[in-house]
Amino acid sequence: MGANVFQAGLDKARIGIQESGELQGVEYFYSTVAAIAEKCLKADLVIGAVLNKGARAPHVVSEAMIRTMRKGSVVVDVSIDQGGCIETSRATTHDEPIFVRRGVTHYCVTNMPGAYPRTSTIALCAETLEYIKLIADKELTGICTLESISKAINIYQSRIVK
């Protein structure tokens, strides 16, 4: 659609790489405070999606960065269920999904997939199908020996295993 799209991350080997396939035209950059601040200056849309497993999401977009964004630009905080990764975010609902702060429209709806249950279910099934096949093929005792899967098992034979 002609947009300049950038993805921040912590994998230095991918810096400057233009993604292909589904992420065609997406340029990767190393996530630093200065780099994110620079991208916010020119952005019409910033989507924050940070996952810190089992903990609150860190703020990667500060209120100072929001102040530098153009009036009418938009931020979407996908991490809002973990407290939000944009400092100016606050949880909203599907009934009242947006608010404006510092001239920037914020969309911070908790449980975003809940708005599209069929689509989110299809996506979840696509990601979990290989594990379901493993359980069917090797049975639960067989997959417990696979290190990558055994770490994900919380309860086994009515006992907490972690």
Image (spheres, rainbow, N blue to C red):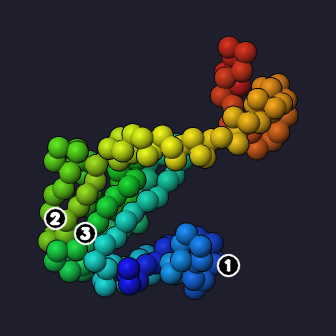
Q: Which of marks 3 and 2 is in front?
A: 3
Q: Which of marks 1 and 3 is in front?
A: 3
Q: Do the residues labelled 2 and 1 touch (CB within 8 Å)?
A: no
Q: Where is residue 67 in the image (x, y as percent from the top left)?
A: 21, 75
Q: Camera-side residue: 89 or 129? A: 129
The quarter in which the N terminus is drawn is bottom left
Q: How crowded is mark 3: few (under 14 residues within 10 Å), some or many (20 or more)?
A: many
Is residue 28 in view from this perspective? no
**Rounded to the nearest whole Å, what is the CA distance between mark 2 and mark 1?**
36 Å
Q: Residues within 10 Å of mark 1 (few under 14, many from 20)?
A: few
Q: Position of residue 9 (x, y in %)?
A: 54, 70
Marked residue nearer the N-terminal end (2 or 1) = 1
Q: In this view, does 74 lie to the left or right of 151?
A: left
Point 31% across, 61% down: residue:
76
Is residue 145 in view from this perspective? yes
- The amino acid type, in three-letter code, at marker 2 is Arg
Point 31% across, 80% down: residue:
43
Q: Camera-side residue: 152 or 112? A: 112
Marked residue nearer the N-terminal end (3 or 2) = 3
Q: Mark 1 = which residue?
A: 13
**Rounded to the nearest whole Å, what is the CA distance between mark 1 and mark 3?**
30 Å
Q: Mark 2 = which residue?
A: 101
- The amino acid type, in three-letter code, at marker 3 is Val
Q: Position of residue 155 (x, y in %)?
A: 67, 23
Point 39% across, 40% down: residue:
117
Point 16% across, 77% down: residue:
71
Q: Mark 3 = which residue?
A: 74
